[in-house]
Amino acid sequence: MSASPPSPADRAAPGRTHSFRSVAAVLGLSWLAVFFDGMDVNIYGAVMPHMLDDPGLGLTPGSAGSIGSWTTFGMLIGALVAGNVTDWLGRRATLITSIVLFSAGSALCALAGGVALFGAGRFLSGLGLGGLMPICLAVVLEFAPPRRAALATGVLMTSYHAGGMAATGLGLAIAPEHGWRPVFWAGVLPAVVAVPLLLRWFPESPGVLLARGRRAEAEAIADRYGMERPRPAQAPPGGARGRWEAVLALFRPGARWATPLLWAASFCGLLLVYGVSTWLPQMMRASGWGLTSSVSFLMVINAGGIVGMLIAGRTADRFGAVRVSAVWFLLTACGALLMGAHLSLWVTYAVVFVTGIWLFSAQTMVYAATHTVYGPAERAAGLGWVTGVGRTGAVAGPWLGGVLLAQGAEGWGFTMFALAGVVGAAMIALVPLAGRSGRSGPAAAAEGADAEAATAS
């Protein structure tokens, strides 16, 4: 037995009170959580040149790439687990656990005296980081007005790049004089700052509460945030059998071909995101730029990422997340090739900034596109698997970058990014066609039109 496809009633706009204003607290707390996610992910790339220069740690370009892959392998496991246990334990508890895990991992990295212990800390951080993103995305998509799902996703993901800029700023301000360890100590802040706020203010998912039989609480939260009251069809299935059925539902008619295409697009997008976050400073340094300029490029590309999220969200609400993601992937490919060219400093800064506009939001619009493929009961599992399987790209990006730098072929890294952009564009562009091919008849045509309208309106 599998969940039914999203119906027009499931996607219908709820009451007129359902607006960004009514869910500002949820979006704000999710924004803070993802901010710390972006800070933790980018800390490694921001201080890597200093770590490579630290003889006591014993880090080499090859081992640095492997550790980057351990981090993202932990993310893969965390995302796959969180996408299913969140419907069992609840969104709130799983999110808080994720934050505690990656804060503890950052503390372990700060204390590490060698590569092995440092790698263990990054793996632990990865477990928490992998769980955080799909939970926040699922919560924001649940609480946001349906007609502004892509915009809400874009606003949320600006926080990732704000966190990346904060990590780069910490690396520039602290690491040259005090070393790289204090920067990792800053990664403990999420447990101190975010966890108390989430415990006090973050609401549980009405759908999860309804699945647990807590209808009164579910309806009270829905009313408080101006949402449509959840119906049984929107609640994630409960129990171990229900979680297995939620996974099987990702391959129902209308999604069975779209699901692997979303996975492939996410693979390419996350290869770009984590390959760039890990290796851009070192690749630019190997290309002849100074240490300060090389690290500054990471801040510039994240600044472009913030602008890109706001542009992509508004554009996707008008033209559809699939179209925007495909175009953004292609523009990223062009930008990656230009970053590898030997241009003047300020022209290179401009190219890196513009590339950031496209690169990060191309992946985010893959997440937003799941809104047209999966119904409310499937969405947490769908997002968990799209982010989780995509994490194999996040594993491949840092590892491959390390291999290329170790062999002195850093110039090929930009070509690798460009190729990932082209393949990602092809995969996401095929999602609507795959969805239609999985259905047949007039009902299928009506459903496909409705799904497109839900994203483009």
Image (cartoon, helix red, strand yellow):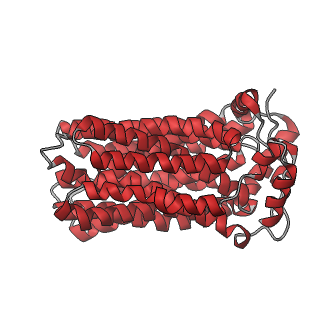
Which sits in the foreground, 278 or 186?
186
x and y percentages locating residue 35 in the rendered image: 48, 61
Q: Which residue is painted at 26% across and 54% down in the image? A: 181
Residue projecting furthest to the bottom: 21
Residue 139 figure quarter: bottom right
Task: Using residue 62 as the reference point, say whether residue 398 is left or right of it.
Answer: right
* Picture quarter with the C terminus: bottom right
Which quadrant would the N terminus be assigned to in this image? Answer: top right
- Name the image quarter holding residue 229: bottom right
Q: Quadrant of residue 67?
A: top left
Q: Is residue 155 above or below residue 434?
A: below
Horizontal side of residue 350 vs 177, given as left or right: right
Q: Please name the residue shown 64% across and 51% down the image.
A: 92
**Can residue 358 be seen here?**
no
Q: Observer-nearest residue: 200 or 227?
A: 200
Residue name at image x 71 percent, y 32 percent: 243
Residue 15 visible here: yes
Count of residue discs = 0
Q: Residue 51 at x, y = what percent?
A: 20, 49
Q: Position of residue 39 (x, y in %)?
A: 41, 58
Residue 327 position within the rendered picture, expressed as x and y whole percent measured from the top left: 52, 54
Vertical order, 383 against 205 (above or below): above
Residue ID at (42%, 54%): 332
